[in-house]
Image (tube, grey):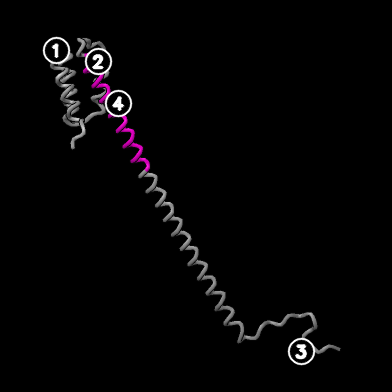
Amino acid sequence: MPDDATPSAGAVLPPPDSQVAPLQQLVLQSELENEQLGRIGNQLTALRLQAYEEEWRRQAAWEQEAAQQAATLQALETLRYAERMLATGNADGLDDELANAEAVLSGRTRLDVEAAREALANEDLYPARQYLAAALAERRVRP
């Protein structure tokens, strides 16, 4: 007859109390480390997102600058074309083209184009050419 105080052959005994406390401490430490790793992972994700957004902003600014530069070059080509047309006495359709160029330009160059358009409206071709020449001179590369 088996003794109730002795464990059966297949039963697993719980660890002694002297081993439970260190195991619980290891479990707690592991949970804390997992939480810390989770926070670090979240921080890395946030930093990656921030870096991506900064790169996106830089790229968008570069693209905008490139588009502005291309539009400015096109506007200057329009001014050169208008100047050539006026040299032959032909002002047909130049007002619309100069209005488009004026919208892209800035500063003194824009003011000169505006003055050229006003001169064209008054059918003063020579002053219009002078204003266009001044506008183009404003945009030349200076050493």
Residue ID for mark 3: 5
The secondary structure that most of the magenta stretch takes on is helix
Residue 10 in percent (x, y) is at: 79, 80
Q: Is residue 125 magenta?
A: no
Gap between marks 4 and 2 measured at Cα: 15 Å
Label number found at residue 124: 1
User: Horizontal and vertical percent for residue 40?
Assistant: 46, 63
Q: Nearer the viewer, residue 104 or 19?
A: 104
Near mark 2 (Cα within 10 A), the count class, few <14, some 14-19 or many ≥20, is: some
- Secondary structure at badge 2 equals helix
Q: Residues within 10 Å of mark 4 (few under 14, many from 20)?
A: some
Task: Name the residue: 61% across, 84% down.
Answer: 19
**Label 1–label 2 contact, CB within 8 A:** no
Kind of residue sitting beneath label 3 = Ala
**Do callouts 4 and 1 mark residues in contact (Cβ within 8 Å)?**
no
Q: Which mark is residue 94?
A: 2
Q: Report x, y in % for residue 70.
A: 32, 30
User: What residue does disc 4 label?
Assistant: 74
Query: What is the crowding at mark 3: few (fewer than 14 residues within 10 Å), some, or many (at least 20)?
Result: few
Question: Element under label 3?
Answer: loop
Taking 104 as reference, is 59 left or right?
Answer: right
The numbered mark, 1 or 2, whose residue comes first in the sequence reads 2
Inter-mark Cα distance, 3 to 1: 121 Å
Q: Which amino acid does label 2 sit on?
A: Leu
- Residue 101 placement: quadrant: top left
Sooner in the amino-acid sequence: mark 3 or mark 2: 3
- Toward which corner of the image does residue 73 lie, by quadrant? top left
Front tag of 4 and 3: 4
